Image: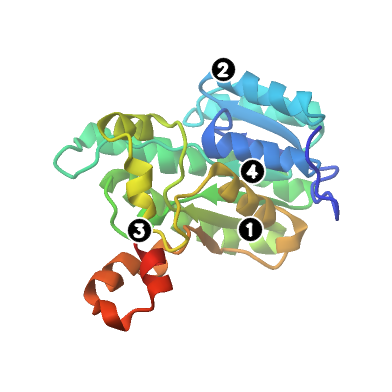
């Protein structure tokens, strides 16, 4: 059965749309919202992955609808919203999770690459919000949760994707300010490295099978993230528990952007550092 919050089902009677919900963070988020009572519409370009995610939720006792579509297409967005509304009566929460990253450096990134990454990462969120916000206002309120990235405020490669995520933060704030008075909150979750089967990570693992273990040493908590870590943050921000949280950027990165323990360990004279700190900082 779906694992339920034994204290309260925060999404009972509510419905959500999760873009890119067929795998990774999107799938984990869809499952988390369903586990708390939400009826979830999963939108994904990959029809089979969307269907598998919805079936998994249904098999666990939840309610889910799979719809294949491109979140960069206004027509597809309109169709997803209509199907979700027909199936579940309303859309209370939108999770803009879909994104695209192609090139790691500025010189690798062509103008076409730049446009594709912005379209897949920032324009998708803009188009979906533009389509759904009037409906949320008309129904009395709602919540938007955008999936950002630490790339949006510190350089860790992938410049076009990073610039798009920085833009997503400003878009989130614009929605929060414009629509907060009309009952719609907008917030963002910014993950650090999350271990998923995304194509970009598959390619990195092909080059270096130990990539996640190497990256873990940069994280003060001693590991990279899991999709469930992000899903938990999304579930909070989309719920009434966060009714006074609007325009926020919740960084879920294991302490990566708080400071660099590896650098500190290398700069500090070893005899002055407690043994327990050295072992933790070294991963």
Read off the residue under disc 2.
47
For label 3, the SS is loop
Decide: marks 2, 4 in contact (CB < 8 A)?
A: no
Decide: marks 1, 2 in contact (CB < 8 A)?
A: no
Q: Considering only order in the chain, which callout, 4 or 3, is on the residue closer to the N terminus?
A: 4
Quadrant location of the C terminus in the rendered image: bottom left
Read off the residue under disc 4.
94
Disc number at residue 179? Answer: 1
Read off the residue under disc 3.
218
Give the alpha-carbon distance from disc 4 to disc 1, as whole Å. Answer: 14 Å
Residue at position x 80%, y 51% in the image:
10
Q: Nearer the viewer, mark 3 or mark 4?
A: 3
- Disc 3 crowd rating (10 Å Cα; few below 14, some 14-19, many 20+) is many
- Disc 4 crowd rating (10 Å Cα; few below 14, some 14-19, many 20+) is many
Residue, far top: 48
Q: Considering only order in the chain, which callout, 1 or 4, is on the residue closer to the N terminus?
A: 4
Q: Nearer the viewer, mark 4 or mark 1?
A: 4
Q: Is residue 240 visible?
A: yes
For label 4, the SS is strand
Residue at position x 20%, y 44% in the image:
105
Residue, far bottom: 272
Give x and y (percent) for residue 200: 35, 33
Quadrant location of the N terminus in the rendered image: top right
Instruction: Report the coloring of the rendering.
Output: rainbow
Which picture quadrant has residue 37?
Answer: top right
Decide: marks 3, 4 in contact (CB < 8 A)?
A: no
Give x and y (percent) for residue 142: 71, 51
Q: Considering only order in the chain, which callout, 2 or 1, is on the residue closer to the N terminus?
A: 2
Give the alpha-carbon distance from disc 1 to disc 2, as whole Å. Answer: 32 Å
Q: Considering only order in the chain, which callout, 1 or 3, is on the residue closer to the N terminus?
A: 1
Determine whether 254 is above or below 35 in the image.
Answer: below
Residue at position x 77%, y 25% in the image:
58
């Amino acid at each position: 059965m779906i694992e339920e919050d034994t204290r309260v089902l925060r999404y009972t009677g509510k419905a959500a749309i999760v873009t890119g919900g067929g795998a990774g963070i999107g799938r984990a988020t869809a499952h988390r919202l369903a586990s708390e009572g939400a009826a979830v519409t999963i939108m994904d370009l990959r029809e089979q992955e969307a269907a598998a995610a919805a079936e998994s939720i249904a098999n666990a006792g939840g309610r889910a609808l799979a719809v294949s579509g491109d979140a960069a297409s206004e027509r597809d967005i309109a169709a997803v919203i209509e199907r979700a509304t027909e199936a579940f009566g309303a859309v209370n929460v939108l999770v803009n999770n879909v994104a695209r990253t192609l090139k790691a450096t500025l010189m690798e990134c062509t103008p076409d690459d730049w446009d594709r990454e912005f379209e897949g990462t920032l324009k998708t969120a803009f188009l979906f919000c533009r389509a759904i916000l009037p409906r949320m206002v008309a129904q009395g309120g709602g919540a938007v949760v955008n999936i950002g990235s630490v790339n949006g405020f510190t350089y860790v490669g992938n410049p076009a994707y990073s610039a798009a995520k920085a833009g997503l933060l400003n878009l989130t704030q614009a929605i929060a300010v414009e629509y907060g008075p009309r009952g719609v909150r907008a917030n963002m979750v910014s993950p650090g490295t999350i271990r998923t089967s995304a194509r970009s990570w598959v390619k990195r693992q092909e080059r270096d099978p130990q990539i996640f273990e190497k990256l873990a040493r940069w994280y003060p908590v001693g590991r990279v993230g899991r999709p469930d870590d992000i899903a938990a943050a999304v579930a909070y921000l989309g719920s009434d528990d966060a009714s006074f949280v609007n325009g926020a950027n919740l960084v879920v990165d294991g302490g990566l952007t708080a400071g660099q323990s590896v650098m500190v360990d290398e700069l500090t004279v070893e005899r002055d550092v407690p043994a327990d700190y050295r072992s933790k900082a070294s991963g």
